[in-house]
Amino acid sequence: MSDDKKLTTRAEDFSAWYNELVLRSELADYSPVKGSMVIRPNGYGIWERMQRALDDMFKESGHVNAYFPLFIPQSFIAKEAKHVEGFAPELAIVTHGGGKELEEPLVVRPTSETIIYHMYAKWVQSYRDLPILINQWANVVRWEMRTRLFLRTLEFLWQEGHTAHATHDEAEAEALTILGIYRKFAEEWMAMPVLTGLKSDSERFAGALRTYCIEAMMQDRKALQAGTSHNLGQNFAKAFDLKFQTEKGEEAFAWNTSWGVSTRLVGGLVMTHGDDNGLVTPPKLAPIEIVIVPIWKTNDERPAMVEAAMKLKAELTGWTGRGASDKLRVHVDDREGIRSGAKYYEWELRGIPLRLELGPKDLEKGSVFSARRDTRAKAPIPRDGVAEAVARLLDTIQADMFAAAKARREAASIRGVTSYDQFKEIMAGDGGFVYAGWNGDPAVEARVKEETKATIRVIPVEEFRSATAPAKCLVTGEPAKYEVVWAKAY
RNA sequence: CGGGGCGUAGCUUAGCCCGGUAGAGCGCCUGCUUCGGGAGCAGGAGGUCGCAGGUUCAAAUCCUGUCGCCCCGACCA
């Protein structure tokens, strides 16, 4: 029972806590290439469930999947002025292939707008060819200077949707539809509350007209951009000659959107829900929802207890109360030679939402003993009707995790800040989401960033705005154009 | 790219100042006893001390160079 078995606590050093948790719960490991990482089965399992949930929502809303190549001609990136400006510094470029220098270097995609709209231009002639609603699951490479497991790595996995529409309004509606999907996913699957709204000009995607985002708060009161949805206007259509003939026979450029979320979400999940004992996974995203630990005192007892555990597992996985395609995900830990206490710690580190203990006493009493990961509350559950009770408990855990995360965010949200001095004090101290007025001037934003490291995370949609709108700009005292949310960000 | 730290067994590290047979804890393997919150005992496997030079009778230790990684900052999903 030495201290090296315990994680560094969040209060001691949040950053060290995060790194230790990711490594020790085997979500990921450092790879031999600086800044890139291996996503291990525990982490990939969560990503797979994220993918499935999102993919279902994309398909339900009329999108289809496709795959575009990893390599993009270097000249493509340069075709949209803002885009090249934004991405040039972080490109990985292939100059040689097959032992020869290439005539034109190939960029390893940092994002796929350019190659995709190049292809769309070939595919679209008429308004009848629109809209195109394509998503792809892919890896991208951005040569970041400072990396962090899941949050920022040289290569990461994501989905990127790219759509083309006949009108601005259609594209705008699409961008907002996706924003809604991202929000729903964050809240209902990740149990992670998010603010939705618009990015300021300086935080906007390189080449976009408008960038919408979902913005989450981590337990250290810093913000995490969890997903973005861009209305690209006609910027890329013009750069790639993506034109079509309208109903009236006129030639027009298409309107595009692009949107993405990445494996960064796994990091967001860790920092939203994790505690000093390790990961806490929301049940809906947990590859294993329930771990059964059979308990025995002597070797004589072992076969009977393992058998009872297997029977319990069969009953749980055979239950169809959640629908035939959504069985309870159950694992039995019947390893010998490891004490049950050690198993508890291990499964808690890994964030399994619910543990069921089954020992001779429980058999006798006709119950199983449950331990929630989120609250660590323990209670017996009657063996009769156990599947339904457990499923209900998992729903409760999912809902409670969301409520707890939301309560944390609200506790760290400060509204009605009108003095810049007070703002600086907050940012120098605990930080948090500060709601305040802004005159809309990028220079003000730049100054605040310089002086406090805080940036405008989001210009929130009405739902998240304060009851009374701030009248004045936090910094200049001029009339406020928007209420914005300031925070330090990952 | 600036600042800081670190490279010794799978992991965490002691030893380095002051050169002289490389040690511990965890983990791993075997056996016995254990088993309702991180087990105990006994035995065992595992190391070109990041790499390359140099100094020396002798280098993990001193010197020079080099590579890598982590953390903090500037830049970013």
Image (spheres, coloured by chain):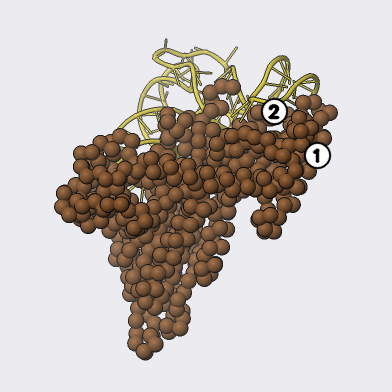
Task: Provide the secondary structure element on which disc 2 rests.
Answer: loop
Query: What is chain B's hue in the picture?
Result: yellow
| Rendered image: mark on residue A307 | 1
Q: In the picture provided, is A125 more to the left or to the right than A284?
A: left
Q: Is residue A287 visible?
A: yes
User: Residue A140, can we see it?
Assistant: no
Q: Are marks 1 and 2 in contact (CB under 8 Å)?
A: no
On the picture, is B33 further left or further right than B12?
A: right
Residue A65, relative to residue B56: is it above or below?
below
Query: Which residue was labeled with disc 2?
Result: A339
SS under mark 1: helix
Q: Which chain is assigned brown?
A: A
Q: Quadrant of the C terminus of chain A?
A: top left
Q: Is residue A202 left or right of residue A76?
A: left
Q: Chain of mark 2?
A: A
Q: Earlier in the sequence, mark 1 or mark 2?
A: 1
Q: Residues within 10 Å of mark 1 (few under 14, many from 20)?
A: few
| Letter of the chain that mark 1 sits on in the rendering | A
Q: Which of the 4 image quarters holds residue B71?
A: top left
Q: Of the residues shown, which amino acid type is indicated by label 1? A: Glu
Nearer to the camera, A473 or A56: A473
Do the residues indicated by labels 1 and 2 lie within the same chain of the protein?
Answer: yes
Give the farthest residue toward the right: A300
Closest to the observer, A470 or B10: A470
- Look at label 2 and name its amino acid: Arg
